[in-house]
Image (cartoon, helix red, strand yellow):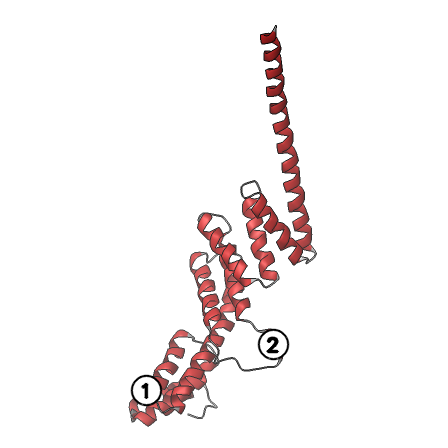
Amino acid sequence: MRLVVAAVLASVVILSGCSSKPKEQIIERSTIEHMYETSQVYLDVGRFTEAAQLLTAMSTRYPFGPYTQQVQLDLIYALYKIGDQDKALSHIDRFLQLNPNHADLDYVRYMRGLVYQQAEFSIFQDMFNIDRSDRSPYYAQRAFEEFGELLRLYPSSAYAADAQARMIGLSSRLAKHELSVAEYYQRRGAFLAAANRAKAILEAHPNTPEQKQALEIMVHSYQQLGLTEQSEDAKGILQANFANSRG
C-alpha cells in the first residue's frame, strides 16, 4: 500500500510540474509581448527615454527570445534619439558582431553614421554661429566613412540617398578643417605643407565650396616657393572654375 501511495503522489507531482511549465511560458510570453507593445507606443509618441529604459530592461531580462533582435534595433534608435551616443555605438557594434547576416545591416550602418554625425553636431556652436573648422573632425570623419561604407556595401539600400546627401555636408566640414590647417601652415611660412594640404582638399573633397580657397592657397604658396609652373597650373584651374577668384 505504501508503494502504491508513493507512486500516486509522485505522479501527481510530475503532472503538476508539467502542467505549470506551459502556464509559466504563456505568462512570460504575454509579459514580453506587453512590454514590447508598450515600447512601441513610447517610440510612436516620442517618449524615447521611457522607450530606451523599457527596451533595455527587455534586453537584460530576456536576452533570447522572439523579439531579441528587434528590441536591439529599436533600442539603438531610442538611444540615438535621446543623444546617448556611447551606448548607441556600443549596441550597434554588438549587433553587427552577433548578427553578421541580418537583413537590416544597412539600417544598422546607417544608424551608426547618424550617431557619429550627431556626436559631431554641437547645438551651442551652431546657435551662436561659432566657427568650428579648427576643431577635431574625428566624428565627422567617422560618419563620412560609415555612410561611404553603406553606399559601397548596399548601393540599393533605402537609406543610400540620404546617406549620400549627408556625405556632401560632411565633406564640406572636413574640407573646412583641412583649410584651417593649410592656412595655419601658410601663416607660419610653411608653404610646401600649405600647398600639399590644399591639394589634398581637391582630391578628397571634390565639388565643395572650399575648393576655391584651396586653389588660392596653392597659387600663393607655389609663388612663394618659386614654383612658377605649379602656381600657373593652379591659377588656371581656379580661373576656369571660379570666375570671380582673386587668382
x 62%, y 28%: residue: 22
Assign a secondary structure to mark 1: helix
| Location of the C terminus (image quadrant) | bottom left
Q: Earlier in the sequence, mark 1 or mark 2?
A: 2
Could you say where residue 96 lies in the image, as x and y percent from the top left? Answer: 46, 52
Horizontal and vertical percent for residue 42?
68, 53
**Is the residue under label 2 in contact with that under label 1 (CB below 8 Å)?**
no
| Residue in the foreground of this view, choosing between 147 and 121 | 121
Viewer-proximal residue among 101 and 235: 101
Q: Amino acid at mark 2?
A: Phe
- Vertical relation: 17 (above or below) 148: above
Q: Which residue is mark 2?
A: 124
Residue 243 visible? The answer is: yes
Marker count (numbered): 2
Residue on which the image places disc 1: 192
Mark in front: 1 vs 2: 2
Amino acid at circle 1: Leu
The alpha-carbon separation of the residues under discs 1 and 2 comes to 36 Å
Q: Nearer the viewer, residue 90 or 198?
A: 90
* Residue 162 screen position, x and y as percent: 54, 64
Instruction: Classify residue 213 by image quadrant.
Output: bottom left
Q: Residues within 10 Å of mark 2 (few under 14, many from 20)?
A: few
Q: Secondary structure at mark 2?
A: helix
